[in-house]
Each structure stands twice: as structure tokens, then as C-alpha cells.
Image (cartoon, grey):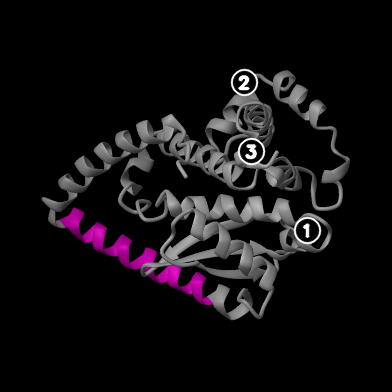
Amino acid sequence: MDFEVNPKEKLYFILMLIFSLFIYLGLIFSIIGGLYILIFAMVALISHGIYIGYIKGNGIKVSNKQFPEIYQTAQELSDKLELKRVPSIYILQSGGLLNAFATRFFGRNFVIIYSDVLELAYEEGEEAVAFVVAHELAHLKRKHLRWRYLLYPAMIIPFLAKAYFRACEYTCDQIAFQLRAEGAISGLLVLAAGKKMYKRVNLEEVINQSEEERGFWVYLSEILSTHPNLTKRLTKLYDNKFLFSDESSNSLGI
């Protein structure tokens, strides 16, 4: 299966890579700069290792015997994405937060799903959960985490890194849509309205809101964020749903 990639992701990646390589070259030829690179790498490694340890010590690991429905979904999606193996998946209590994210440590991939998202699987929201999982696996497919540290120096350039991250989110939304179109809208609505209220949301009004709620402050808040506004993400998936239902409904099951 060919997966659609947001064209801005490729553009911003190239720009960030060029800037980062120039900065790294400058630091390498400087004794002090080389020391900074070493210190930063050690601090980043230790802090990330501690967080992975926290996840392993406090989360519940998904397997074919623990939340087998989620494991089976992840295995199916990983096969379709042609990942070498299913990443380690952990369920983590988050005090009511609705989210999931992917991370990487010493060559191992991890997906962390907050427990409130998982509850959807037991409230007739399996497809919504599958979309959320597919979105995180898409980050691994696109190797977004593998390149993160290489691109880190370019984050000093105002707005560029955030623009790249937002483009990556659009890419992962699109890939997840191709894999689990049925859960795309509800999967994002859950993040916007919560696991109880998302079924009551009037989607057309959300689409209208994305057109009406514009202006300087909305624009500024978005360009300073690593994620596009949820109303815009929903609008894009809403448009895709009608596009694909007209042109390729057989492949997507819509």
C-alpha cells in the first residue's frame, strides 16, 4: 500500500537537515562546541532512559495475553505498515488526559496509550482506538523519531521546527485514515471533546467553527504548536472521507 505524505513534511525536513548539518559542522570544529554536543547527548540519553524506566515500571504492557484486542490491532496495523516488528505498547494512567504517543530508545520503538483512550475500546469505539494507534505507528513508519536528534539544532530557527512537526502530524493523520478510515473522525473527536461527549458533537458545526474561528491569536497559537489545530485536522479528514468514499470506497471500506 502506498501511503500519502504531506508535501510540506519533505520540504521542512530538508530545510531542517541543511541547517542542522551546518550547525553540527561548526560545533565539531570547535572544542567547546564538541563538548556541548557530548553533554547534551548524555543529558538527553539519561533523561529519556529515566522516562522509559518510568513507563516500564508504571504502565501495563500490552501483549496477546494482556489487552489482546489492542495487541491484535497493533499487529495488524504494523503488518500493513511493513514495520519489522510490533513496537512495545504500554497503557499508562494519565489522570484523565486523552492522548497517545510514540517514542524510541536504543533502537526500540514504544507506543504509549493513555488509559482513558483505551476505555473507548470497551465502549463501542474500537475503530476510534485503532485510528489513534495507527497514527502513532505512522510516526514509526515515517521514522520521525529516528531523525529527531539529528534535526535538533534547527529547532533554534523560529517556527521552522514547529511547522515540520505539524506537517508530520498531518502525514500521520492521513496514513491512519488510509488504514482505519472508519475511526478517523471519532478518533480525533475523542481528543477534542472527551471519551463521553465525542458522540454528541455536531461535526458540521466543528467544520464551520474551523472557518469562523480565525484571526491573529488563533494563527499565532497554532504556529507556536507542534500540532495543527484539531478543528483543522478534523476538517481535513472530513474532506478526505468524502473524497475517498466517492473514488475508492472499496479499498477503504467506507
Residue 11 lies in quadrant: top left
Residue 8 lies in quadrant: top left
Membership of 45 in magenta stretch:
yes
Q: Is residue 180 left or right of residue 46?
A: right
Q: Are marks 2 and 1 in contact (CB under 8 Å)?
A: no
Which segment is the magenta one? 32-53
Badge 2 or badge 1: first in the primary sequence: 1
Task: Identify the secondary structure beneath mark 2.
Answer: helix
- In this view, 123 is above or below 222: below
**Disc 3 residue type?**
Asn
Badge 1 or badge 3: first in the primary sequence: 1
Classify 10 Å Cα crowding around label 3: few (below 14), some (14-19), many (20 and above): few
Residue marked by disc 2 = 216
Q: Which mark is residue 120?
A: 1
Q: Is residue 69 left or right of residue 52?
A: right
Gap between marks 2 and 1, in whole Å? 35 Å
**Disc 2 residue type?**
Phe
